[in-house]
Amino acid sequence: MSWITLTTDDVLTKWAGPELEAAQTAALASGQSDPIPEIIAQVIREIRGYVAACSRNTLGDGATIPDELLGEAITRIRYEAATRLPGGALLDDDRRAANTAAVAKLREVAACRFSLEQPATESAEVISAPASPRWKARARQFTRAQQDGL
């Protein structure tokens, strides 16, 4: 297994051609281009965020994702593309359930409960989270022993 770059051809493996064409051409404003590449980029960033949330994981170089999450990526892309169409023409209960399952697996990855193969080439990208609040307990001025006789 390795880290892969996701393409529109990968999306075609799970989506019928006419459906993909509808998602690429329907409900476009004048001058608006194919939305699928942007949806793919968005989902890649999302998955990389889930992967980076687990401190045991290392991100792969470039816009790559672990191939263990290819199915989840394609499911998320199909869902996001289907939600942009009016009336939810391509959005059915099966796709909603698949999307829910994909997000649940990504949460497992983020919680370090799903192991991923680490990339051969690490990313130079730095992912950071806000610092956790830290405090130091004050030393007690009065202890139980000092209160004897009060």
Image (cartoon, grey):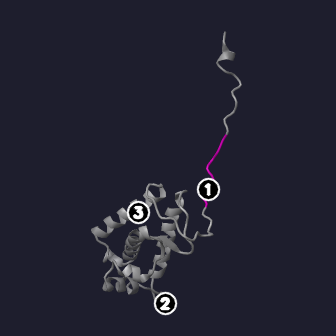
Nearer the camera: disc 1 or disc 2: 1
Q: Nearer the viewer, residue 73 or 23?
A: 73
Residue 131 on the magenta span: yes
Question: Residue at label 2?
Answer: 31
Number of other residues with Cα within 10 Å of mark 3, as a class: few under 14, some 14 to 19, many 20 or more:
some
Determine the secondary structure under disc 2: loop
Say which amino acid is labelled 2.
Answer: Gly
- At which x and y percent is residue 80? 41, 73
Question: Residue at label 1?
Answer: 130
Which residue is located at x 52 percent, y 70 percent? 45
Magenta highlight range: 128-135
Mark 1 or mark 3: name the one nearer the start of the chain. 3
- At which x and y percent is residue 74? 39, 73
Task: Answer with left or right where residue 111 lies relative to residue 90.
Answer: right
Q: CA distance from mark 3 to mark 2?
A: 32 Å
- At which x and y percent is residue 34? 45, 85
Determine the secondary structure under disc 1: loop
Number of other residues with Cα within 10 Å of mark 1, as a class: few under 14, some 14 to 19, many 20 or more:
few
The residue at the far bottom in this view is 31
Q: Nearer the viewer, residue 4 or 74?
A: 4
Question: Residue at label 3?
Answer: 103
Rendered image: mark on residue 90: none
Q: Is residue 103 above or below residue 136?
A: below
Say which amino acid is labelled 1.
Answer: Pro
Say which amino acid is labelled 3.
Answer: Val
Mark 1 or mark 2: name the one nearer the start of the chain. 2
Quarter in which the C terminus is drawn: top right
Which residue is located at x 42 percent, y 82 percent? 8
Q: CA distance from mark 1 to mark 2?
A: 39 Å
